[in-house]
């Protein structure tokens, strides 16, 4: 309901303020799906940032918002959704 607060036109970053390593996220998806990802490690591109996470200070200030879903629970919910909606999701065009 915080997203319904009358704050005018603002861009507000919602997410976790705790960084997650990409490889940890991949391993979590592997564990939840029972599949092993094929990984290929490449040199870091100069445009890649070494770390990123949501800056939620504005959401706190304007909406009183705090993240409530731990990353692991969010990934689990996403995997469960995809498994339920696999037939529908397979029809999506990605181009």
Image (cartoon, rainbow, N blue to C red):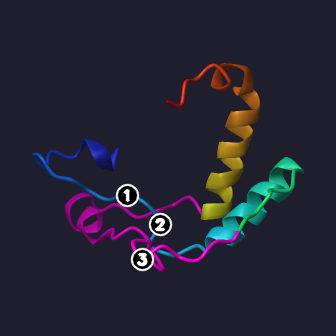
For marks 2 and 3, give the CA distance.
Answer: 25 Å
Image coords of residue 75 (percent x, y): 66, 53
| Residue in front for this viewpoint, 94 or 51 | 94
For mark 3, what is the residue?
46
Nearer-the-camera pick, 33 or 6:
33
Query: What residue is rendered at 15% in x and 45% in y?
Result: 6
* In the displayed structure image, the side of residue 63 where residue 86 appears, left or right: right
> Quick one: SS at disc 3?
loop
Q: Position of residue 63 (x, y in %)?
A: 25, 57
Closer to the camera: disc 1 or disc 3? 3
Q: Residue at x 68, y 24 (%)?
A: 90
Element marked by disc 1: loop
Magenta residues, as a range? 41-70
Label of residue 1 in the image: none
The reply to whether dot 1 and dot 3 touch (C-beta < 8 Å) is no
Look at the numbered discs 2 and 3 and tell me whether their residues touch, using CB distance below 8 Å: no
- Which residue does the numbered mark 2 point to in the structure image? 16
- Give the residue number, with chain letter if any, for mark 1: 14
> Disc 2 or 3, which lies upstream in sequence?
2
* Residue 35 at x, y percent in the picture: 87, 51
What secondary structure characterizes most of the magenta part? loop
Quadrant assignment, res 57: bottom left
């Amino acid at each position: 309901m915080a997203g319904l607060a009358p704050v005018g036109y603002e861009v507000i970053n919602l997410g976790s303020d705790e960084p997650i390593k990409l490889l940890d996220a991949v391993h979590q998806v592997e564990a939840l799906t029972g599949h092993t990802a094929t990984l290929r490690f490449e040199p870091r591109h100069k445009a890649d940032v070494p770390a990123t996470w949501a800056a939620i200070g504005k959401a706190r200030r304007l909406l009183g918002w705090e993240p409530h879903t731990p990353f692991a629970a969010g990934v689990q919910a996403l995997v469960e959704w995809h498994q339920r909606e696999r037939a529908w999701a397979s029809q999506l065009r990605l181009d």
